[in-house]
Image (spheres, rainbow, N blue to C red):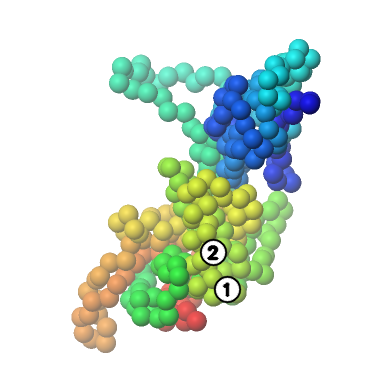
Amino acid sequence: MAAIEVVLPKVDMDMTSGVIAAWKVAEGDAVSEGDVLFEMETDKSMMEVEAPGSGVIRELAAINGEQIAVGTVVAWIHPPGEEADAPVAAHVASAAPAAVKPPAAAPVHAASAGETLQPFNPTRRLLIERLVDSTRNAPHFFLSMQVDMTALQRALREGPQSTPRASITVALAFLAGRVLLAHPLVNASVEEGGVRLHDAAHIGIAVERDADLLVPVLRNAHARTLAELAGDFARLRAAVDARSIAAADLRGGTFTLSNLGMYGVDAFTAIINPPESAILAIGRAVDTPVVRDGAIVIRTLATLTLSSDHRVIDGATAARFMADLRESIEQPALQ
């Protein structure tokens, strides 16, 4: 029986390289077809790579955290009891993945005995590249608005319940999806030489996983029920936590929500997720005394801040969108 190649797979049409984040097997381990061999990070997702056959792991390429070209042989699976033969071993040595390492940066100060350097993982490196690209290329401007969340919270609490229950974030995605269609420039993507207007609202929700930021996308948020969005978000959140989120679930967004209210953050500005033209930052909802019809009443207020790409959106456009969104939140129709 011939030895079986284990290669870095191509899981996306535009994928050219990936990173072995962690091996789940070691040299000499016996594996069965379908066993997980390693975790791979692409520029969009994390996935588990399974054994294409059964046998013993040989010539394992112990390179973690470096970009490797798609199709590179990273290990071989030999029939049980068979040692790696010379031709295969030699082939693995012309085909071993070569990673180009950048020159080491000079330390800014002498490290003390208690300090350690924690390298950026591939997901964090990708996030850094995207954030730097966004802040460099997109002239951001910010517009904040206090919104009365009382009616929306009551509607979620007293209205028909779904399993899983819809969170405030999902409810805002539901409402924003409908408002966005009336404000196409806020639901747009910036491309070289122009702006692409979308006829559907695909809303990304920024979530954290092990200190990394991922943005799974709720497809067609403008046309789906609140219960459907709640179920889809639960599925995406579980996939993020299990490190099994598919690349397709992380791309194609037209607008993004980032909610830090659950951490006690009153208000913040978010960096636009390129190539989108805007992102909405959601602060915490706070019971606040306000004047209504000449009387002081307690209402639950939250500060929403829209970050806009000034190449596409001007101040009046952003203000009209925020005004319509506030109206939809303060008079919510969740059915």
x, y percent for residue 61: 63, 22
Q: Amino acid at mark 1?
A: Arg
Nearest the camera: 200 or 305? 200
Residue at 23% across, 86% down: 294
**Dot 2: few (<14), some (14–19), or many (≥20) neighbours within 10 Å?**
some
Q: Amino acid at mark 2?
A: Asp
x, y percent for residue 114: 30, 21
- Helix, strand or loop at mark 2: helix
Which of the 4 image quarters holds residue 310?
A: bottom right
Residue that extends furthest to the front in the rendered view of this protein: 81
- Helix, strand or loop at mark 1: loop
Nearest the camera: 161 or 14? 161
Can residue 73 be seen by looking at this rendering?
no
Residue at 50% across, 73% down: 227
Do residues under tags 1 and 2 come within 8 Å of each other at their CB atoms?
yes
Which of the 4 image quarters holds residue 117?
A: top left
Can residue 4 be seen by looking at this rendering?
yes
**Dot 1: few (<14), some (14–19), or many (≥20) neighbours within 10 Å?**
some
Specify the quadrant that holds the N terminus. top right
Residue at 59% across, 21% down: 27
Q: Which of the two discs, 1 and 2, sits closer to the camera?
A: 2
Which disc number belongs to residue 242?
Answer: none
Which disc number belongs to residue 224?
Answer: 1
Nearest the camera: 294 or 199? 199
Q: In this rendering, is residue 89 above or below 183?
A: above
Residue pointed to by mark 2? 232
Q: In this rendering, is residue 16 above or below 57?
A: below
Q: CA distance from mark 1 to mark 2?
A: 10 Å
Residue that extends furthest to the bottom in the rendered view of this protein: 293
Q: Is residue 324 left or right of residue 277?
A: left
Considering only order in the chain, which callout, 2 or 1, is on the residue closer to the N terminus?
A: 1
